[in-house]
Amino acid sequence: MSALNTFFYDRFMSGLEKACLHDWRTELLAEVTGEVLEIGAGTGANLAYYPSGNIRLLLSEPDAAMRNQLEKKAATSQRNDVCISNAKAEQLSFDDNRFDYVIASLVCCSVTNIDRSLAEIYRVLKPGGRYLFIEHVAAKTDSKARRWQEWLTPLWRKFAGNCHLNRETEKAMLRAGFEFVKIQRDAMPDSVPAIVRSSIHGIAVKPLN
Ligand SMILES: C[S@@+](CC[C@H](N)C(=O)[O-])C[C@H]1O[C@@H](n2cnc3c(N)ncnc32)[C@H](O)[C@@H]1O
């Protein structure tokens, strides 16, 4: 992400936050407890939504400009349970089976290798641990929106921090071994541009065995 993109990121996202992300973050993060890892934490959009109490929060963000904003937001959040790391999703420098929760919002679209990233998330979760996700994803095959996504992605990636409009993230999560506890599809309102409207959000679990 360029320093310019980072500077404007929160302002750029504010419409989407109002349209749906605020409600989804509120609903999803309310249950979080214990050892928690957030990957691609960006400028810290989720920080305000984590409950207080029995929680140890490790926020990872590999991009230096985004991490700088994240550190500032964490410092003013009045939480004393936050640590920040620069780990990439593809190579999480944490022990197997460590976390009760892993969180990723709008990250699988941007990682370099989605299968490797999901394998790492799976590895660091405890058996029974939960992966909470919010992602914009590929529209239905053969839809007009999907054709636009395929056409625009090579250019879009260059200006939007490697964001792919056409990732089939749900299939990748199943390939990684996750089971869905709850998944809501295509819930972004019509006010959101069609190329990013297709979305999934919900809870996946690393099975107990
Ligand atoms: C669209 S932003 C989302 C930020 C934040 N999670 C949110 O909900 O607003 C995508 C984030 O993924 C991060 N990212 C990109 N590639 C990554 C990777 N390989 N591993 C972890 N994070 C990555 C970017 O640096 C950026 O902070």
Image (tube, grey):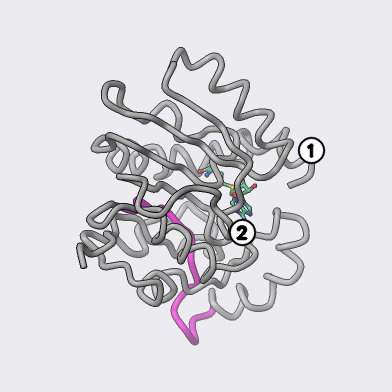
Q: Nearer the viewer, residue 175 or 43?
A: 175
Ligand 1 under 8 Å from disc 2 Cβ: yes
Residue at image mark 2: 110
**If you read the primary sequence from the N terminus, does the residue marked by circle 1 or circle 2 appear first?**
1
Asked whether 28 falls inside the magenta stretch, the response is: no
Q: Is residue 53 left or right of residue 68?
A: left
Asked whether 132 falls inside the magenta stretch, the response is: yes
Q: Is residue 181 above or below residue 45?
A: below
Q: What range is drawn magenta here?
A: 130-144
- What's the amino acid at mark 2? Ser
Marks 1/2 in contact by CB < 8 Å: the verdict is no
Label ID, residue 73: none
Q: Is residue 81 left or right of residue 156?
A: left
Residue 208 at x, y percent in the picture? 20, 62
Bin the neighbour count of mark 2 within 10 Å (Cα to Cα): few under 14, some 14-19, many 20 and up. Answer: some
Residue 150 at x, y percent in the picture? 63, 78
Ligand 1 under 8 Å from disc 1 Cβ: no
Q: Secondary structure at mark 2?
A: loop
Whether residue 189 is visible = no
Q: Is residue 125 above or below residue 77?
A: below
Bin the neighbour count of mark 1 within 10 Å (Cα to Cα): few under 14, some 14-19, many 20 and up. Answer: few
Q: Is residue 173 left or right of residue 147?
A: left
Label ID, residue 3: 1
- Residue positioned 52% across, 64% down in the render: 194
